[in-house]
Amino acid sequence: MKTMNAGRLLAWGMVVAMPLWFGSCKKDGNETINPAPNSVEGNWKISGMKITAGSKTVDYLDYIKTNGGADVVACLTDTKITFNSNAKITGTPSPLCKSDGADDYNPAANNSTWKVTGNKLTITDEDGLETYDLSVNSSTMTWSIQEQEDLDNDGVKDTLTTTIEFKRV
């Protein structure tokens, strides 16, 4: 029987141990990664709006367009929203904005302020404040908020989630 030298034994030990070491570094799938506060800074355009109630999701921009609001959707998706480093929000209206009511759908009004705390984004404007769940990477930003409304007039408040998607420009 041959004897193994110490170097070969150590090499085999490393080969066996490495997967265990790297496997222990794996992130837990339930971890929340909070966006950096300055990751919101920059220019964005709305790319989508969805409303979910129960198991039903409605593309809100398609709904507006289908119900005679094509000009509102064109305005919303082409208006540049700037999140400045001084926590102010400014906007550059699109030349496609031909409807006075388009600003009613914009969640980030001109001259409002913003603040990121953990994975929450708070927008403060003349109507008060709204706090959204926030997800952001280099090219997309997503806000979501849950609200309670009696959607079917049965006297019971239903939970609906509004999700707003942005693309960096």
Image (cartoon, rainbow, N blue to C red):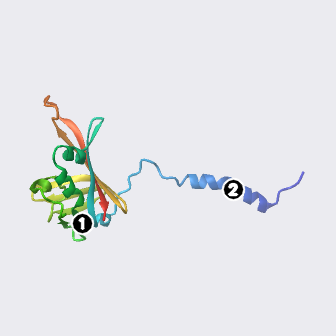
Q: Quadrant of the C terminus?
A: bottom left
Instruction: Give the class, few, some or many, for how many residues have Cα within 10 Å of label 1's Cα (few <14, many ≥20).
Output: many
Q: Amino acid at mark 1?
A: Phe
Say which of marks 2 and 1 sits in front. Answer: 1
Q: In screen coordinates, is 11 left or right of 93? A: right
- The residue carrying mark 1 is 83
CA gap, disc 2 and disc 1: 50 Å
- Residue farthest to the bottom, as pictured: 86
Whichever of callouts 2 and 1 sits on the residue coming sooner in the sequence is: 2
Image quarter for residue 63? top left
Q: Residue at x 78, y 60 (%)?
A: 8
Instruction: Give the class, few, some or many, for how many residues have Cα within 10 Å of label 2's Cα (few <14, many ≥20).
Output: few
Give the tally of numbered discs: 2
Q: Which disc is residue 106 wearing? A: none
Q: In screen coordinates, is 75 left or right of 41? A: left
Q: Which disc is residue 15 wearing? A: 2
Q: Residue at x 9, y 59 (%)?
A: 126
Q: Residue at x 23, y 40 (%)?
A: 160
Q: Tell me the SS state at disc 2.
A: helix
Whole-percent x, y for residue 21 in the image: 59, 55
Whole-percent x, y for residue 151 in the image: 17, 35
Whole-percent x, y for residue 158 in the image: 20, 35
Image quarter for residue 22? bottom right
Whole-percent x, y for residue 153 in the image: 13, 31
Image quarter for residue 110? bottom left
